[in-house]
Amino acid sequence: MSLSARLASLGSLLVALFFGSFLLGRYPVPPQDVVSLLLESLGGSSAAVDDTRRTVVVHVRLPRILGAILVGGALSVSGAAYQNLFKNPLVSPGILGVSAGASFGAAMGMLASLGWSGIQAAAFALGLFAVGCAFLIGRLVGRDSLVVLVLGGMVVSALFQAFLSLIKFVADPINTLPAITFWLMGGLSRVSLEDIRASLLPVLLPLGAFWVLRWPLHALSTGEEEAATLGVPVKTLRFAVILGSTLLTAVSVSISGIIGWVGLLVPHMARALVGPSFPALLPASFLLGGAFLLLVDNLCRTLFAAEIPLGILTSLVGAPFFLVLLTRARKEWGKC
């Protein structure tokens, strides 16, 4: 199968999951009503559908489905970009501390009794701040090295995890602490169309930048010295990758909380389908990431009477895969 056919198959899978997801849930909605309401949302004629079904489709399921696609695609592209930059298959989007910083920001917002939009803004801002701290540590050490940057990210993650634990320690155990704990498990139940609209620009900008830079990024995967000999501005490109991936991850965490493993798993799945070339891996990661998270979210809200937090199920899927990945890495180490 050709590359274009594989990408078309992934796109078809995502479209099928998009429409099929509207039919899942405690409240049944006929397919014709779903189509009518979606056309109405796009500016079509008013659909002859009762208000309950309109609320379920437009205000409950539509933002949740779009959120799953946006978050899954953003995390997957971020993971693929980081794995390409660090040339390490075990790298995930939170390597530089953005997830820990965003978690602390959200917890601070809940402790201060901010509204949902304020909590999201605090998570987004602190996620960016955490990565900035990792950069600052690298500058203070005085070495322009990816290894030093990763070590700085580890330090920042540890600090913000400690701050998060402090917030949980002083939080009201009746109301605030359960809210923080539930948010950290990840989920899309509170996503609204306003959240989706606000997140489009900070997601589309990095995606567009990665697409424009797809060939230099592909050259970067061969190594920084080799890329420099080809005329690639390595330091500028490295900064662009880290900034773009940080934006994608911070937006995702601010919408959905902590959802692990997607940025680690999906790039490997996409690489197995389309190969390691970054121009092919970029769209494949986004399509497959959106489809993967949408499928998992459908399972979370339909498997049991009570909804399972999304981060729990992604971890249950990701842990066995990570074990397989470690086994393969051990075989490679044995050849060295």
Image: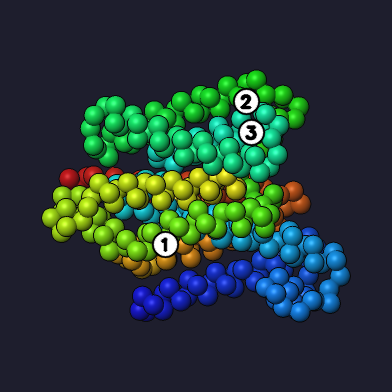
Distance between the alpha carbons at the discs numbered 1 and 2: 38 Å
Q: Which mark is residue 109?
A: 3
Q: How many marks?
A: 3
Residue nearer the viewer, 265 or 258 = 258
The structure residue drawn at horizontal position 67% and vertical position 28%, both measured from the top left corner, is 111
Q: Quadrant of the C terminus?
A: top left
Which mark's residue is nearer the viewer, 1 or 2?
1
Distance between the alpha carbons at the discs numbered 3 and 2: 12 Å
The structure residue drawn at horizontal position 52% and vertical position 75%, both measured from the top left corner, is 12
Q: Residues within 10 Å of mark 2 (few under 14, many from 20)?
A: many
Q: Residues within 10 Å of mark 3 (few under 14, many from 20)?
A: many
- The residue singled out by tag 1 in the image is 208
Q: Position of residue 172 (x, y in %)?
A: 72, 24
Label 3 secondary element: helix
Marks 2 and 3: in contact by CB < 8 Å?
no
Can residue 192 be seen?
A: yes
Marks 3 and 1: in contact by CB < 8 Å?
no
Q: Quadrant of the N terminus?
A: bottom left
The structure residue drawn at horizontal position 56% and vertical position 39%, both measured from the top left corner, is 123
First reached walking from the N terminus: tag 3 or tag 2 = 3
Q: Quadrant of residue 298?
A: bottom right
What amino acid type should be assigned to the residue bearing mark 2?
Lys
Label 1 secondary element: helix
Which mark's residue is nearer the viewer, 3 or 2?
3
